[in-house]
Image (cartoon, rainbow, N blue to C red):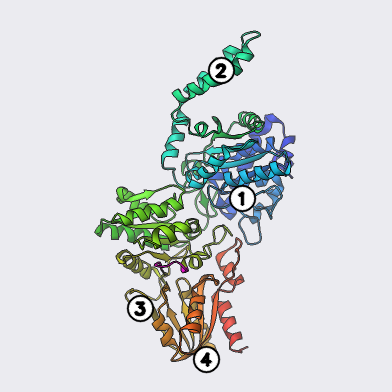
Amino acid sequence: MELLDRINKANDIKNIDQKDYKKLAWEIRQFIVNYVSRTGGHLASNLGVVELTMALHLCCDFPSDEIVWDVGHQSYTHKILTGRKEDFSSLRQYGGMSGFPKRSESDCDVFDTGHSSTSISAALGLAKARDISGGNQKIFAVIGDGALSGGMAYEALNNAARLKSNLVIVLNDNQMSISGNVGGMSSYLGRIRTNNNYTGLKEDVEKVLKKMPHIGKALTGSIRGFKDVIKRILIPGMLFEDMGLTYVGPIDGHDIKQMVSAFKSASKMKEAVIVHVRTKKGRGYMPAEKDPATFHGVAPFFVRDGSVRSKAADKDTYTDIFGRKIVQLADKNEKITAVSAAMPIGTGLSLMAEKYPDRFFDVGIAEEHAVTFAAGMAAGGLHPVVAVYSTFLQRAYDQILHDVCMCRLPVVFAVDRAGIVGSDGETHQGIFDIAFMNSMPNLTIIAPKNAWELENMLEWAISYDAPVAIRYPRGNACMDFSEHKEPVRYRTGEWLIRGKDIVLLAVGSMVKTAMQVHDALKEYELDVSVVNMRFISPIDYNILQEVCYNHDIVITLEEGIITGGFGENVMRWYNEEGDCDMRVYCIGLPDDFIEHGAVDLLKRKYGISSECIVDSILKLMGIE
């Protein structure tokens, strides 16, 4: 890695000879593959933008110039070129380097990202701040064609067309988001990719004109209007230019010289410019090239063949359970449809897509549209299920409230990755969904204690004629408590253990934790009750009333933030409605952004592991 050894801080790449760029790109790819194989992380997306990132760094002076990376899945080369290669051993580990851009990590990271389709808006804001402040720095937004399916990107493009100063929008076109791209923009870019008529004709005409003595240069500049006419004849749509944006491309995203030339030219224009580059996701590592969707985000793997280093026991995840169950229900009910926002594999809907393609809809990275689209189907008599990660559902807050709940439409939200998810960190922890949905009228929120209950909750939710959200965690499904199979009934919890003095009211993933706490407290001669509340909202008030007869202390357990959560609802009921004097304690997560790290470690740090809860209860009871 002789060339990479010379990259120790920002702008060092400019000391590399141009003839060595290909070798440096190769060394960077080897570096990324080697480190991600040990820690896990986003691989294919980062391998695809090595030359693109190098070209940007050759055009920029850091930290004065600014790059906003959409989502941030592709920022590893940027981190390497800005002096962070020594930190890659701690990539996505607790206390280590984030897998996403972080302003707190480097002054070369200008904006924290993690969710899609935000880069153009942020870069446009940075451009306005530069102009008002009298700066002259270059500003780039790097957005993938997958992220360009998100509506927010078009809102930003609409405003960028009015910009009278420079902003360069780099469209990284690899024909992928996480899975393959869908929709009209994908088709449009596909036509541009394959249409070389205009590019070839333009180059031929310019070569001939430039050879004409005296008048060639002048003629080359005077035919701009004629070229625009040719564009509209030979390239369908010319959407970007019709919006008022200057479009350059498509160009080879692995040709550094070509990109440097395009970026430098685009940076001199007093307007927003789109530079369209074509890259290959997973480039340089054959397993990732062959299967970029699988190698988008990977666990530690063997470099020789891409196989997982320590394969977990072959157990069903909650995602697996959901994916099979929705197909079983769809077999019997033709009104069931399924909606994904560019994540059919991640949310378990690939089986539904395969068996019922006419009832499965991947809308691209467009959560807001997904929800209102589902609301429209529900209004038309169907029963849609929107499968989405908790962290991405928050992008559609208004659509859930206004378009689904206000109309009391029977849309089911399968809220995957609810709770702490681990190494992706702040932008992906699913800890806010209870709080932001809890206040929504007409919305029922439920959480299963195990695999069996998820299946039955989904079946119940489909039969219920109003909105329902089912939240379940990432990872292997709990298979315990097989003896507890009370039917799922509206607003009805389930007693698991009847004791006295203390009662644990738990929801979802915290039911298993509550049972562990119960067992641990036996040796302290504490007789603890455990209730699987099932319904986060509305709460089973009958159980709350029944608790009063034999208990003095209520402890609520939830894997979400406390403010606005399940525990606060319980506390409010006892304070305002209950006719008994109960001491209520809420155990959950702090109202904060939780960093990246292993799930078990984070649960211990934030006090929701069984050991921490036992310690809290013993302290509460005055027991050493």
**Residue position marked by numbered label 2 in the rendering:** 223
The CA distance from mark 1 to mark 2 is 51 Å
Marker disc for residue 525: 4
Give the answer, above or below, for where 373 lies relative to 241. below
Q: Mark 4 against mark 1, which lies toward the viewer?
A: 4
**Residue position marked by numbered label 3 in the rendering:** 483
Q: Please say whether residue 439 is one of the residues in the magenta stretch.
A: yes
Q: Earlier in the sequence, mark 4 or mark 1?
A: 1
**Residue 87: horizontal and vertical position, in percent?**
68, 53
Mark 1 residue type = Tyr
The CA distance from mark 4 to mark 2 is 90 Å
Mark 3 residue type = Glu
Residue drawn at 61 percent across, 18 percent down: 221
**Residue position marked by numbered label 1 in the rendering:** 35
Quarter of image, res 371: bottom left
Front in this rendered view, residue 222 or 149:
222
Q: Mark 1 against mark 2, which lies toward the viewer?
A: 2
The CA distance from mark 4 to mark 1 is 49 Å
Quarter of image, res 448: bottom left
Q: Mark 1 against mark 3, which lies toward the viewer?
A: 3
- Whether residue 225 appears in this view of the structure is yes
**Residue 34: horizontal and vertical position, in percent?**
60, 48
Give the answer, above or below, for where 569 lies relative to 262. below
Disc 4 crowd rating (10 Å Cα; few below 14, some 14-19, many 20+) is: few
Q: Mark 2 against mark 3, which lies toward the viewer?
A: 2
Mark 4 residue type = Glu
